[in-house]
Image (cartoon, rainbow, N blue to C red):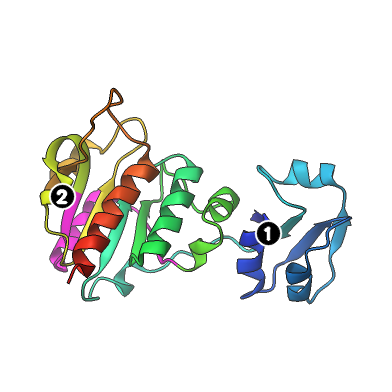
């Protein structure tokens, strides 16, 4: 996997040694250069433009594929707060949600293996290096995972635009918030598996929010309730 952009590369270089480092010929960032303890390949901007799918800021590194955490590692944690993503497809949304989860101190992010964005270079860059700081769990079946969470004392709250006001729900215990697909929302089986379905009030002409924005609102309501005392 290729990781690019200064923040994402700094996050990786501070912890691990990449397989290969590509630097633009005029690259001069002192902090990053001080973290490099191996040979690099000096390349031109055109090479990096072709290698990377976004703004690379003059650096790209080749690393091992992302390693997901084990969902069982958090099931018995007290006061655990998780975000469960129901087949989000946009890696930018996934990266933004991971960044918000890290900022808010959430316990982790759950996403399915199939028909979903996975942690790739775009996600790592969008998350501004926070993907390595938030446990991310990749599961085979979301409905089965919701059942597992419930067995371990979690309340599961879905999100939709036509139900209970999200502020009226108690998030102070072990909680999992479900964010649906960008276009279709939650799948029927996932929705049916939720204990509550929360709605974020809309006062303008727009009748839906970007998935990462909706996630941010829900996450900080969880934070507000857990820390209000």
| Left or right of 53, for residue 76 | left
> In the structure shown, which secondary structural element does the residue marked by tag 2 occupy?
helix
- In the rendered image, residue 56, in percent from the top left (x then y), is placed at 71, 50
Q: Quadrant of residue 192?
A: top left
Q: Quadrant of residue 179?
A: top left
Residue under circle 2?
167
Q: Nearer the viewer, residue 104 or 24?
A: 104
Extent of the magenta region = 134-157
Q: Quadrant of residue 15?
A: bottom right
Task: Assess disc 1: are there few (<14), some (14-19) or many (≥20) residues with their C-alpha within 10 Å of its C-alpha.
Answer: many
Vertical comparison of 132 with 157: above or below: below
Asked if the residue under mark 2 is in contact with the one under mark 1, i.e. CB atoms within 8 Å, the reply is no
- In the rendered image, residue 177, in percent from the top left (x then y), is placed at 25, 53
Residue under circle 1?
6
Quarter holding the C terminus is: bottom left
Res. 87 visible in picture: no
Q: Earlier in the sequence, mark 1 or mark 2?
A: 1
Q: Nearer the viewer, residue 38 or 96?
A: 96
Residue pictured at 62% horizontal, 63% vertical? 64
């Amino acid at each position: 996997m290729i990781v690019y952009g200064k923040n994402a590369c700094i996050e990786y270089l501070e912890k691990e040694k990449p397989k290969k480092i590509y630097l633009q010929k005029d690259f001069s960032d002192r902090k990053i250069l001080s973290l490099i303890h191996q040979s690099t390949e000096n390349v031109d901007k055109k090479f990096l433009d072709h290698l990377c799918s976004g703004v690379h800021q003059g650096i790209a590194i080749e690393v091992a594929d992302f390693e997901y955490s084990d969902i069982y590692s958090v099931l018995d944690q007290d006061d655990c707060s998780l975000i469960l993503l129901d087949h989000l497809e946009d890696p930018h949304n996934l990266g933004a949600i991971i960044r918000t989860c890290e900022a808010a101190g959430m316990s982790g992010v759950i996403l399915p293996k199939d028909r979903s964005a996975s942690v790739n270079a775009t996600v790592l860059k969008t998350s501004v290096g926070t993907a390595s700081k938030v446990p991310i769990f990749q599961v085979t079946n979301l409905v089965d995972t919701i059942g597992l969470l419930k067995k371990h004392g979690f309340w599961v709250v879905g999100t939709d635009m036509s139900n209970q006001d999200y502020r009226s729900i108690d998030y102070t215990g072990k909680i999992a918030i479900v964010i649906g697909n960008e276009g279709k929302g939650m799948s029927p089986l996932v929705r049916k598996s939720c204990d509550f379905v929360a709605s974020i009030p809309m006062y303008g002409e727009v009748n839906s929010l970007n998935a990462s924005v909706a996630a941010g609102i829900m996450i900080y309501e969880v934070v507000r309730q857990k820390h209000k005392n």
